[in-house]
């Protein structure tokens, strides 16, 4: 496996001990998803916390334990650390009851990020399903902040229903940018929905890619990832240029607990970002 | 010729252990009131029945990686700004220099394997590291394999070439003692009265004993052959048959000296306080990989059993250069469904050798 560097982590002597982080703001994305803007409760810790797109943090919620949550904000200071969380279980349900001023615990950042330096100079295709747009948003905003380093940017986004769409305030802006296209589809529309209906793969017909100079970043439900990865390879993208980020149950995030073991790899430390070539060699 | 070798008279064993236990904790196989032999801390050598004959039911895993341990405590309190504060207080275990005496070869190998996971990866486990520091191992070579043992096939016994501080061979009325790592030489140097230099007849007797022990394994378990076969094929039929017999109890993982998977949970003590606790976990539990919203990427007993055996015989070979089975045979004893390592290896080999059909796996 190619050793891509892990970004600096705020390592303490005890790797299981979280840092308290205060919730600065909560933005509802849709009825089941909220974005939490965090800042370390200890001002000194903020300088030490840096991450790269694709990495995740272990989030502690009082009395609920921890869960891995991918980072949705771009790297760099000022914008805060944002986590976009869907209410799916006990811990995320409890997190949704928290508001500004409340504290959570964070450990990390952990995991192998998207290879942003390797992607420079290439056209990028982002393919997301539902909440899977969160880690891709981190990468996309990093590209927009250094626009000259990347070629054409395309976002294809599929959701089950219009009420599952995240970051809807930003999607129009992404469509209006130069060399930036954004297409959205839903599996099932509603009375108000005027846009496209169909699986995210139907959007591939609308885009005109240059396969040899395009890299893809994919995140979403596992079944969607499988279909999209195969489709991208059929379209002529090399397996080494297709990247996805996997979601697994994790307890430690640092390669010890065994929960995220996936065909000989640990999603927490060998991933969560893998190229299609790496997944195929499992 | 081996390392420095000595003779320890059996009459001198308890006095030696008494001295070893003065400034360090002593852990050894002890027979308890129920007749079970377990590795346990020895506090009173007269009261605690030292038992060097039976196979301890536990491995040494729990001494470095307890079945349940508190990682830290936390407090949740309202704060002046209207939100709540959430703070963490660490609790690392004390370092306790310990002599582990009478350890079987396979069990020391189990510890060395756990070291790979907890100390040699990208991140060290601070809790394991604390307990592991200052551990000295005096192993006891097996002169007769126990039922179900196959350490000859995993090359982790019945005696050791490396890893021990002291290695004892039972020669009937006396122990033949080899020194390995520095901790062993220190013990000999500190209490020289207990150790006489071994003579040529002692060396010959030790050689004979080691040779005989190797010849006494009744079952031939071809672990290397299975590892080779598994590198190139999926053991689908074998896994399906075995998974029908798995009761999802996790016993195999809990008795295994090298199974290190764990879970972490919060244990609330009251509204404002709680502890974060880590406990052993097992990949054969149906909830092991289940995520929020009941999504489960490793679903079904077949998938779980496949994952367990391939982890030990395929993925750990790729990662660490050897399978993570030490041939201790404990999974044979604990599993009433017979979903054990020896049976898995035998079934894989029988498929590989004879191109057997599914029916043969029954």
Image (tube, coloured by chain):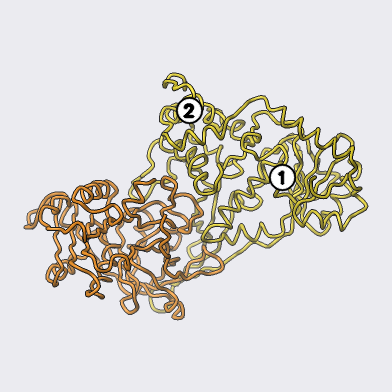
Chain colours: A orange, B yellow
Distance of mark 2 from mark 1, alpha carbons?
Answer: 37 Å
Along the viewing direction, whichever of B344 and B264 lies nearer the viewer: B344
Along the viewing direction, whichever of B212 and A104 lies nearer the viewer: B212
Q: Residue B195 vs residue B32: left or right?
A: right
Query: What residue is rendered at 86% in x and 57% in y?
Result: B189
Along the viewing direction, whichever of B98 and A126 lies nearer the viewer: A126
Q: Secondary structure at mark 1?
A: loop
Query: What residue is rendered at 76% in x and 41% in y?
Result: B140
In the rendered image, the vertical position of residue A185 relative to residue B13, given as above or below: below
Residue B110 on image: x %, y %: 63, 45
Q: Chain of mark 2?
A: B
Please tell me the numbered disc located at residue A16: none
Query: What residue is rendered at 18% in x and 69% in y?
Result: A170
Numbered circles on residues, count = 2
Residue B282 on image: x %, y %: 51, 43
Q: Residue A88 vs residue B231: left or right?
A: left
Q: Nearer the viewer, mark 2 or mark 1?
A: 1
In the rendered image, the vertical position of residue B230 relative to residue B125, given as above or below: above
Snapshot quadrant of residue A43: bottom left
Q: Secondary structure at mark 2?
A: helix
Snapshot quadrant of residue B176: top right
Residue A80 on image: x %, y %: 33, 75
- The residue identified by callout 2 is B245
Q: Residue B124 vs residue A216: left or right?
A: right
- The residue identified by callout 1 is B161
């Amino acid at each position: 496996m190619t050793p891509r560097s892990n970004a600096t982590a705020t390592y303490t002597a005890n790797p299981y001990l979280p840092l308290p982080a205060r919730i600065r703001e909560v933005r509802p994305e849709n009825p089941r998803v909220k974005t939490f803007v965090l800042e370390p409760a200890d001002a000194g810790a903020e300088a030490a916390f840096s991450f790269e797109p694709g990495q995740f943090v272990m989030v502690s919620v009082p009395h609920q334990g921890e869960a891995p949550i991918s980072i949705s904000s771009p790297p760099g200071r000022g914008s805060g650390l944002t986590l976009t969380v869907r209410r799916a279980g006990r811990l995320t349900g409890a997190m949704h009851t928290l508001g500004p001023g409340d504290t959570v615990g964070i450990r990390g950042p952990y995991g192998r990020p998207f290879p942003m330096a390797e992607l420079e100079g290439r056209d990028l295709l982002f393919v997301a399903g539902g909440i899977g747009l969160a880690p891709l948003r981190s990468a996309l905003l990093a590209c927009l902040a250094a626009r000259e380093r990347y070629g054409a940017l395309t976002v294809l986004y599929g959701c089950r229903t219009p009420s599952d769409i995240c970051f809807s305030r930003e999607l129009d802006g992404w469509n209006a940018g130069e060399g930036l296209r954004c297409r959205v589809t839903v599996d099932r529309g509603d009375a108000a929905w005027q846009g496209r209906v169909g699986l995210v793969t139907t959007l591939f017909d609308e885009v005109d890619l240059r396969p040899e100079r395009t890299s893809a970043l994919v995140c979403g439900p596992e079944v969607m990832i499988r279909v999209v990865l195969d489709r991208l390879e059929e379209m002529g993208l090399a397996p080494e240029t297709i990247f996805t980020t996997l979601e697994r149950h994790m307890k430690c995030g640092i390669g010890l607990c065994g929960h995220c073991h996936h065909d000989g790899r640990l999603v927490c430390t060998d991933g969560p970002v893998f190229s299609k070539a790496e997944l195929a060699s499992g | 010729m081996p390392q420095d070798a000595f003779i320890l008279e059996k009459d001198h064993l308890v006095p030696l252990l008494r001295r070893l236990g003065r400034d360090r904790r002593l852990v050894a196989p002890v027979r308890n009131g129920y007749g079970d032999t377990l590795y346990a801390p020895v506090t009173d050598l007269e009261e605690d029945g030292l038992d060097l004959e039976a196979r301890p039911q536990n491995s040494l895993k729990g001494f470095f990686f307890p079945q349940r341990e508190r990682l830290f405590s936390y407090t949740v309190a309202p704060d002046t700004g209207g939100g709540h504060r959430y703070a963490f207080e660490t609790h690392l275990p004390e370092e306790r220099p310990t002599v582990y005496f009478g350890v079987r070869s396979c069990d020391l190998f189990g510890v060395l394997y756990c070291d790979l996971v907890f100390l040699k990866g990208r991140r060290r486990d601070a809790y394991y590291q604390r307990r592991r520091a200052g551990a000295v191992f005096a192993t006891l070579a097996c002169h007769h394999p126990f039922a179900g043992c196959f350490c000859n096939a995993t090359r982790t016994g019945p005696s050791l070439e490396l890893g021990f501080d002291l290695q004892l061979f039972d020669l009937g009325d006396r122990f033949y003692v080899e020194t390995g790592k520095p901790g062993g030489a220190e013990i000999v140097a500190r209490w020289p009265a207990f150790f006489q230099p071994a003579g040529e007849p002692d060396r010959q007797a030790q050689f004979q004993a080691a040779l005989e022990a190797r010849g006494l394994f009744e079952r031939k378990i071809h672990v290397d052959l299975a590892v080779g076969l598994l590198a190139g094929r999926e053991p689908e039929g074998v896994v399906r048959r075995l998974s029908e017999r798995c009761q999802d109890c996790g016993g195999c993982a809990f008795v295994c000296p090298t199974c290190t998977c764990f879970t972490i949970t919060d244990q609330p003590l009251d509204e404002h306080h709680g502890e974060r606790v880590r406990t052993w976990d097992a990949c054969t539990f149906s909830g092991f990989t289940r995520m929020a919203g009941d999504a489960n990427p490793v679903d079904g007993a077949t998938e779980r059993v496949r994952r367990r055996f391939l982890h030990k015989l395929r993925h750990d070979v790729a990662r660490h250069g050897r399978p993570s089975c030490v041939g201790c045979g404990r999974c044979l004893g604990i599993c009433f469904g017979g979903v054990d390592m020896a049976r898995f290896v035998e079934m894989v080999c029988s498929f590989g050798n004879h191109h057997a059909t599914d029916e043969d796996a029954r």
